[in-house]
Image (cartoon, rainbow, N blue to C red):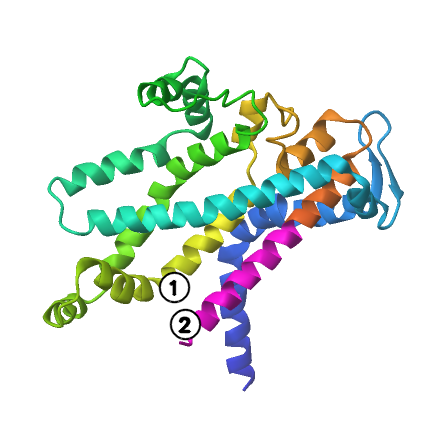
């Protein structure tokens, strides 16, 4: 008995020894910062000069409800998530189903569609800013079709929409590849049986393809929710870090950056916003998982 116990202890210690580099890195760069951020959220912090921490309890969290810019950032972020996640999921599914239908030169189109995902987010944003210019490519195309043009970057009514269009175009190909891999696992016999029953392409898509892809769709939606809630770099580049015009591109993560690094004495408040954002993402993810499980029961 003692020999078996000592053997298990020795095996466990060897396992933890080999895992120790990973545990150290995770603790140093992930677990440690999370704990420190939670600590900061309950303090008024002074990090310049004489570093000081003053415990303020839930005061930082209560200030969020009185902060008009925080409400605007939350609304912009929610609006962005609600529009972009379904759009990019649907577009990725349609692209994947189209490429999986046996088109000629489909490998070429797969590479072309996937190129935006390989390009740096900052580079893509700068390219789209050039295209969104009042004399840019997009307005020229709109003029050609006699459609109204827009000041995509300077108009508060369309600035966030411009970011939505750009990010949907650049992120849908990544999820397209995930759908393509999942489509390979759907048995061909299901489609052959449907053809014998006289089903057309649309019926096969909604009766066979979509139901069999529900687990993958749930994963794509969850990943999309997590990614869209963390919108920062495009909004920062578009607005020069201000969230303008008129706070129309201000997101929660950009606001956290402003309070953490652009204002003095508000690091604790920025940490409270970060913690709130993490809770919102967690709740949204749990709801999506619960809904996807309920759908799979039918």
Q: Where 83 sits versus 197, above or below?
A: above
281 part of magenta stretch? yes
In the depicted view, which residue is nearer to us: 193 or 186? Answer: 193
Image x and y of residue 221, in percent: 45, 54
Image x and y of residue 135, in percent: 42, 12
Q: Which residue is mark 1?
A: 215
- Quadrant showing the N terminus: bottom right
137 part of magenta stretch? no
Q: Is residue 247 left or right of residue 228?
A: right
Please name which of the two marks, 2 or 1, marks the residue nearer to the observer. 2
Image x and y of residue 67, in percent: 78, 38
In the depicted view, which residue is nearer to us: 66 or 258? Answer: 66
Q: Secondary structure at mark 1?
A: helix
Q: Where 163 sits versus 79, above or below?
A: above
Q: Which mark is residue 296?
A: 2
Can residue 200 be seen by looking at this rendering? yes
Quick one: label 2, few (<14), some, or many (20+) residues within 10 Å?
A: few
Magenta stretch? 278-298
Image x and y of residue 14, in percent: 50, 63
Can residue 185 be seen by looking at this rendering? no
- Quadrant showing the C terminus: bottom left
Q: Main secondary structure of the magenta part?
A: helix
Q: Is residue 47 left or right of residue 207?
A: right
Residue shown at 71% from the left, 28% from the top: 261
Q: CA distance from mark 2 to mark 1?
A: 8 Å
Marks 2 & 1, CB-CB < 8 Å contact: yes
């Amino acid at each position: 008995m003692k020999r078996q116990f000592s053997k298990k202890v020795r095996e466990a210690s060897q396992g933890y020894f080999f895992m120790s580099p990973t545990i150290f890195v995770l603790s140093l760069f992930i677990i440690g910062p999370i704990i420190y951020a939670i600590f900061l959220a309950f303090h008024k912090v002074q990090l310049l000069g004489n570093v000081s921490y003053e415990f303020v309890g839930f005061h930082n969290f209560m200030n969020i409800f009185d902060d008009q810019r925080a409400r605007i950032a939350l609304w912009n972020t929610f609006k962005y998530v609600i529009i972009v996640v379904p759009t990019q999921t649907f577009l990725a599914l349609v692209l994947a189903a189209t490429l999986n239908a046996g088109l000629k030169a489909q490998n070429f189109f797969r590479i072309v569609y996937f190129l935006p995902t390989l390009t740096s987010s900052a580079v893509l944003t700068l390219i789209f800013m050039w295209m969104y210019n009042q004399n840019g490519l997009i307005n020229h195309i709109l003029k050609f079709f006699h459609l109204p043009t827009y000041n995509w970057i300077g108009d508060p009514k369309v600035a966030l929409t411009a970011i939505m269009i750009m990010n949907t175009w650049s992120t849908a190909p990544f999820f397209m590849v995930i759908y393509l891999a999942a489509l390979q696992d759907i048995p061909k016999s299901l489609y052959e049986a449907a053809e014998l029953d006289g089903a057309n392409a649309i019926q096969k898509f909604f009766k066979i393809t979509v139901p069999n892809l529900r687990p993958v769709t749930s994963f794509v939606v969850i990943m999309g929710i997590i990614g869209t809630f963390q919108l920062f770099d495009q909004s920062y580049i578009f607005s020069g870090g201000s969230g303008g015009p008129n706070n129309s591109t201000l997101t929660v993560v950009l606001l956290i950056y402003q309070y953490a690094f652009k204002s003095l004495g508000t690091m604790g408040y920025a940490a409270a916003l970060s913690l709130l954002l993490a809770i919102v993402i967690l709740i949204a993810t749990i709801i999506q998982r619960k809904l996807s499980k309920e759908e799979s029961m039918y």
